Image: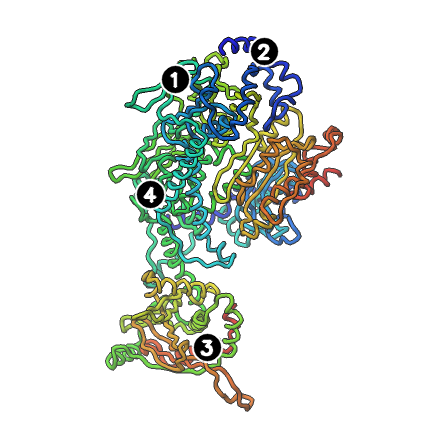
Amino acid sequence: MQSSLSLSLSLSTPLSTKANSSTPRSIRFCGLRREALVSNLTHRHRPVPPQRIQRSRVPVSCASTSSNGSSASVKGGFDYDLIIIGAGVGGHGAALHAVEKGLKTAIIEGDVVGGTCVNRGCVPSKALLAVSGRMRELHDEHHMKSLGLQVSSPGYDRQAVADHANNLASKIRSNLTNSMKALGVDILTGVGTIVGPQKVRYGKTGFPEKEVTARDIIIATGSTPFVPNGIEIDGKTVFTSDHALKMEWVPDWLAIVGSGYIGLEFSDVYTALGSEVTFIEALDQLMPGFDPEIGKLAQRILINPRKIDYHTGVFAKKITPAKDGKPVQIELIDAKTKEPTETIEVDAALIATGRAPFTKGLGLENINVATQRGFVPVDERMRVLDANGELVPHVYCIGDANGKLMLAHAASAQGISVIEQLTGRDHVLNHLSIPAACFTHPEISMVGLTEPQAREKGEKEGFEISVVKTSFKANTKALAENEGDGLAKMIYRPDTGEILGVHILGLHAADLIHEASNAIALGTKVQDIKFAVHAHPTLSEVLDELFKAAKVLPSELLIRPKKLVSRKFLREICCLTYCKLSSLPIFEAGN
Amino acid sequence: MANLLHLNLRSVFVPSLSSRRHSSAAPRRHQFRVEAKVREIFMPALSSTMTEGKVVSWLKSEGDQVAKGESVVVVESDKADMEVESFHDGIMAAIVVLEGDSASVGSPIALLAESESDIALAKAQASGSGSSGSDQKTEAVAAPVAEPEPVLAPSVAPVSAPVSSPVVKVASTHPASEGGKRVVATPYAKKLAKDLNVDLGTVVGSGPMGRIVAKDVELAASSAAVSEKPKVAAAAAAASTVQLGSVVPFTTMQGAVSKNMLESLSVPTFRVGYTMTTDALDALYKKIKSKGVTMTALLAKATAMALTQHPVVNSSCRDGKSFTYNSSINIAVAVAMDGGLITPVLQDADKLDIYTLSRKWKELVDKARAKQLQPQEYTTGTFTLSNLGMFGVDRFDAILPPGTGAIMAVGASRPTVVGTKDGRIGMKNQMQVNVTADHRVIYGADLAAFLQTFAQIIEDPKDLTF
């Protein structure tokens, strides 16, 4: 094995160049666009050893019977074909796909199966958000009345709400565990450490440690809440999402440090349960990272009408938990000048400043890998790079630990991509096709580039972009639900019809985004997807509106002198249906 | 005094922010310039059905350079939010309609100046094209030391309604307020303060460590409203013969009457009855019932309207020596509760429209049932209504609650055969009311006149709905 590998590595450069420069038809793409591949030319590409391709074909029958590859099938004297360190959503997704592909797989879990997402993240927070969504509806007397409903003073039982979140987490956790057990994935408990090439040690503290070998290793250790220096967490009055999800109490006044997805979702939960919220955001604008237009509207819908205020452009330099009858104290400093601005006192503070990779104790130094701010450096195929930027053979890293895109489903997709590579099919995941969602009420979702990002890319690469928008007020189903608040916008290339990004804020936006993300992943063009039929009346027609509103123009129109067809003019043509009043000045421009 | 002046000026300044920046004398210099240098940005018609639009957000602020075709404002129509672009190059000189406010289609929402030097002109124009009140604002800007408005409140306040709690300027004592320099208020309290125009600096916090919470702001807003009332009342009183909210000593004769009354009875009451036709009222009730209007609200409104013309019937005798002319008309309505009786109060029933009044009444009844009425919601009545008519009682009399001048007992309205003026016999719905009054302050003639007015309103109720 080793020798064959070294041989293949020496061959790799010419081979890979050939593979890449020739048409990529031989490789399966999932959301892979041509330019993504072209940019890979410089990377060394490990060709697949012939025997592996063979092997990967043989066990297909095995996969259909859903059982883990038998140890007899493991070539080269390894205990396993694959060891995954970390049994979160990423590790789980990789394990399932590995078994399907006939790899004998083990997964090492140091904490609980399901990882952050299932136990301390997406899953329990969705349970709380389900509660907050209903509370919001019930409390919105005006909304209820306009539907003709009468509800008298709704209330909630905090413990029951907390139990709902907790029960959901354990249910999903056992589902995950069972699905792996049913497939015969070996679940090894303990903290996994890489002790050398293809060798992992694991064990619980107090128990003898064991060593196992595997041909390939996937690191999927995830992340923990990031707590900036100066912030003292006591788990009661100053806490992270980990504690907040347990919902041990509902403070009257909660400061949320950070206004990204996590902060925003928790503001939705806590304000629905009666708290007042103060956001502390280091950047000048709330909700950085969202498309600016969506962010602005989100502020109007999710922040302004609620019992929320905010400080922007400030850091929380020091946060002291409540003690001796004193409330939580937060010292704010100007984000730019670092001058102290003010100290605020609140009942509790939730730290939602992002997440830090959990990569300590992995033994990365044993394979000469240096983390970057804790993240494991990888290439676009999730192959781990060592301190010199060279590929480390047989080691991959997926999910939050590599920091490419810290989303559960991204981790899983990366895992599947790795398994594809391990079983003989090259695969590069297009991260621009991975949707993201924020489960506020209403929800926010997005895929691909934001408008400024697209504009920048367009300017750099010399293409025009167009934007179409539609309002939920124009959607029958949304109006039937009396939920007309919201906007959907699509950014696309008017010359090719390529979808660059879609952003939705509105009822069930998180469920709506997939039509767009699938289109991006599969490379479907606007001019094609616009003929796809949507059931009426459904929210999906919001996207239908976008597709139909988009105008793809023949390229000769686009290369006309700028004076005649300015970008603005194009935008106007493309937005005619939804056009803002701005269409008027165009006619003026003609004078 | 200095404080008051300061406050006064501030309240004048705030709405006219636009005229503040380059105010000094500049407007006059440019008075004779050509108008075209300043262009108006109009509220556009974004759809065929749109008559009014709300300014969602300004994308440009005052002083910003605006290029032709650039988006300047986001407007919410009945269908969607849209960005509105400028037709001209220029500098955003003045924003006339602020974010969150609405304007009718075609009305100017901002002014665009052609060059720097036109900004002042635009600003002058902005303040001129605003409401009529804005002229005074400009004057106030020009002459900040102009004579302070005569302070009305103190002369009236001490004797005014017992409900008015003085607005004391108290800095928050929250430890994080840095010795009162900073106001510590919860996010919702801040929002409310903005909506209700309450200066947080004057609010006493009741939250943990003296933090200002939402209910403190609400309380401050309601007490501010109460303390403002004397002014309104004073203005109204000028038109009438007696000073509302003032104390007028008894004449010797009145004093004697009082004395005699007390001697004969501890509460010297008497009763006056009146029969009136309710066909018109019934018809009106039928028409607006679907809008949530109740008969109780209609009666309370009619009573309050009649009382505005007969302030004495709304007065009371507290010490046996004086009339207390109540500053507001607060109609208490007796509500039977299990095991008792409570009188929720419709405050300022004369000033509220019938729909608001009905809503308020519903709230009060709900609260009364839930035993959540606050003291000021059942103790501040100045005139009481008792309606047993709804139970079919055709006439009864009521005992006067202490501290008020009169109570009206309302009987059932029932079809009655009556002789009409044209000499025919007809069927009309008639209702009897019976007022019990404290004869120390309210005399028979007062009641008779009051009842006449009341009957006129009931028989021709078009004014009840404005």
Whole-angstrom CA distance, mark 4 to mark 1, is 39 Å
With respect to residue B437, does A38 lie above or below? above
Mark closer to the observer (4, 1): 1
In the rendered image, residue A576, in percent from the top left (x then y), is placed at 69, 42
Residue B109 visible in image: no
Amino acid bearing label 4:
Trp
Label 3 packing within 10 angstroms: few (<14), some (14-19), many (20+): some
Amino acid bearing label 2:
Thr
Q: Which of B106 and A406 lies nearest the eye of the viewer?
A: A406
Q: What element carries label 4?
A: loop
Which chain contains the residue that carries disc 4? A
Check disc 2 and report the residue beneath it: A13
Amino acid bearing label 1:
Gly
- Of the numbered discs in the image, which one, if any, rests on residue A363? 1
- Of the numbered discs in the image, which one, if any, rests on residue B453? 3
Q: Which of marks 2 and 1 is nearer the N terminus?
A: 2
Q: Earlier in the sequence, mark 2 or mark 4?
A: 2
Mark closer to the observer (2, 4): 2
Check disc 4 and report the residue beneath it: A249
